[in-house]
Image (cartoon, helix red, strand yellow):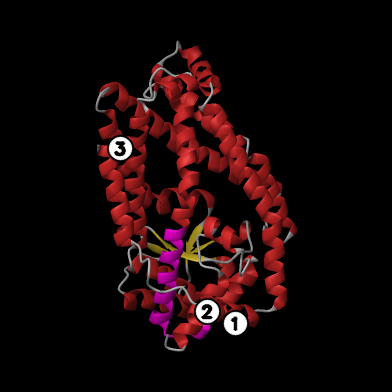
């Protein structure tokens, strides 16, 4: 019952909070007109780069899913957990934390060759500025962050199942939702600095303009920071991260080097749109509800004895079922990806409209989109099925067409 109620609440929240119809997607004719305005070399390069990147991405997705299913739907995963706990006398916490991290690490390691393949392509096309040493350090940092967060989550989850063997799912669902909220608050100040250095933007016209833009928009920000993105990439970007006291504008140093100030301000105006419309908060709420629904769904599946038997676990609350839980999460994540991307695209479209309205400059918005597509080697008009399945943002031609329609009073 709780699972059904929470699922309905999640669906209702998604329907109410996401701007499904506004702004409207520009007609295909306007998109084709925008495509015709872009330099042929930019279009061709983006499609060439996407064609080089996609096979590795699809293979990584497939191999990762297969690994999760093999670990979770056979006794292999439970045996790994048991082996990790054996030196500690099969202690429940040792099995939960060490065994869980071992299964998680193994599931990630099988996709490591595809990550290396991706890095090779990024270097070949000139988007990555990292050598293999820097790349390896970033991978190690990512695994370390995953290990720390995973250890805390595993210890908390299996501690709850021991303390409340019948009502664990209530506390676990609540804890999972609160963890999503906590991560939204602390990610900018604790996790982001692990991967990038941030320095306050030097006083000057651009900093003044960005702070004035945020004030005019009614979006209080704590600071304007510059991220040292150039040490790993030539891609350009900016974002507004955090909620409340942790909110700040972050601009890639590559964007400052590549774009004029009016286009930098336009990127920031888009990001302010996310904050203004509460997209971070909405994403946090939906993520928290999704986490709670997943926990309750796991509790429901706990009554499926055949599934547990296949996984080599006696109970869904046993550490021996960790691999099964990860397999369930992997399947749910894959199945929900198209919907998550659709939600993201609608939020991005609204932020685009916000940026154009805030600045009153659709021409600069269009030129900024062309610059982003050129610098990031974007596929400006991807095949519709791949776009629907995997794109988290509107295509470049959709965004330029929307600016043109706005300029024409549409």
Q: Is residue 284 visible?
A: yes
Helix, strand or loop under label 2 = helix
How far apart are the alpha carbons under marks 3 and 2?
A: 43 Å
How far apart are the alpha carbons under marks 2 and 1?
A: 8 Å
Q: Which residues are magenta?
A: 342-364
Assess disc 2: are there few (<14), some (14-19) or many (≥20) residues with their C-alpha within 10 Å of its C-alpha: many
Residue at the spot x=31%, y=50% of the render? 10
Q: Quadrant of the C terminus?
A: bottom left
Q: Are marks 3 and 1 in contact (CB under 8 Å)?
A: no
Residue marked by disc 2 = 401
Assess disc 3: are there few (<14), some (14-19) or many (≥20) residues with their C-alpha within 10 Å of its C-alpha: many
Q: Are marks 2 and 1 in contact (CB under 8 Å)?
A: yes
The tag earlier along the polypeptide, 2 or 1, is: 1
Relative horizontal placement of residue 90, taking residue 385 as reference (left or right): left
Residue marked by disc 1 = 33
Relative horizontal placement of residue 387, taking residue 15 as reference (left or right): right
């Amino acid at each position: 019952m709780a699972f059904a109620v929470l699922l309905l609440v999640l669906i209702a929240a998604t329907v109410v909070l996401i701007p499904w119809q506004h702004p409207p997607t520009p007609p295909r004719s306007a998109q084709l007109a925008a495509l015709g305005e872009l330099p042929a070399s930019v279009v061709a390069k983006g499609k060439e780069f996407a064609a080089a990147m996609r096979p590795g991405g699809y293979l990584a997705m497939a191999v990762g899913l297969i690994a999760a299913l093999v670990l979770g739907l056979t006794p292999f995963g439970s045996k790994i957990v048991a082996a990790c706990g054996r030196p500690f006398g099969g202690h429940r916490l040792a099995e939960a934390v060490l065994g869980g991290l071992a299964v998680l690490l193994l599931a990630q390691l099988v996709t490591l060759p595809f990550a290396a393949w991706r890095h090779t392509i990024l270097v070949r096309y000139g988007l990555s500025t990292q050598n293999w040493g820097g790349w390896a350090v970033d991978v190690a940092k990512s695994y370390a962050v995953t290990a720390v967060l995973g250890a805390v989550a595993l210890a908390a989850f299996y501690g709850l199942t021991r303390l409340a063997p019948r009502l664990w799912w209530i506390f676990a669902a609540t804890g999972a939702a609160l963890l999503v909220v906590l991560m939204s608050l602390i990610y900018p100040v604790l996790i982001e600095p692990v991967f990038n250095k941030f320095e306050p933007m030097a006083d000057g016209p651009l900093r003044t303009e960005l702070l004035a833009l945020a004030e005019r928009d009614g979006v209080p920000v704590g600071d304007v920071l510059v991220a040292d993105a150039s040490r790993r990439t030539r891609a350009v970007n900016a974002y507004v991260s955090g909620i409340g006291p942790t909110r700040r504008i972050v601009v890639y140093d590559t964007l400052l080097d590549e774009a004029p100030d009016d286009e930098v301000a336009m990127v920031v105006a888009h990001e302010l749109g996310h904050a203004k419309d509460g997209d971070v908060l909405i994403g946090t709420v939906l993520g928290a509800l999704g986490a709670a629904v997943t926990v309750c769904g796991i509790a429901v599946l706990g009554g499926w004895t055949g599934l547990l038997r296949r996984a080599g676990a006696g109970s869904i609350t046993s550490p021996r079922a960790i691999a099964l839980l990860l397999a369930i999460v992997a399947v749910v994540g894959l199945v929900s990806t198209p919907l998550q991307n659709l939600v993201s695209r609608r939020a991005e479209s609204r932020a685009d409209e916000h940026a154009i309205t805030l600045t009153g400059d659709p021409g600069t918005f269009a030129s900024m989109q062309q610059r982003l597509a050129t610098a990031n080697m974007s596929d400006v008009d991807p095949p519709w099925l791949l776009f629907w399945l995997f794109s988290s943002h509107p295509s470049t031609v959709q965004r330029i067409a929307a600016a043109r329609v706005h300029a024409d009073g549409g």
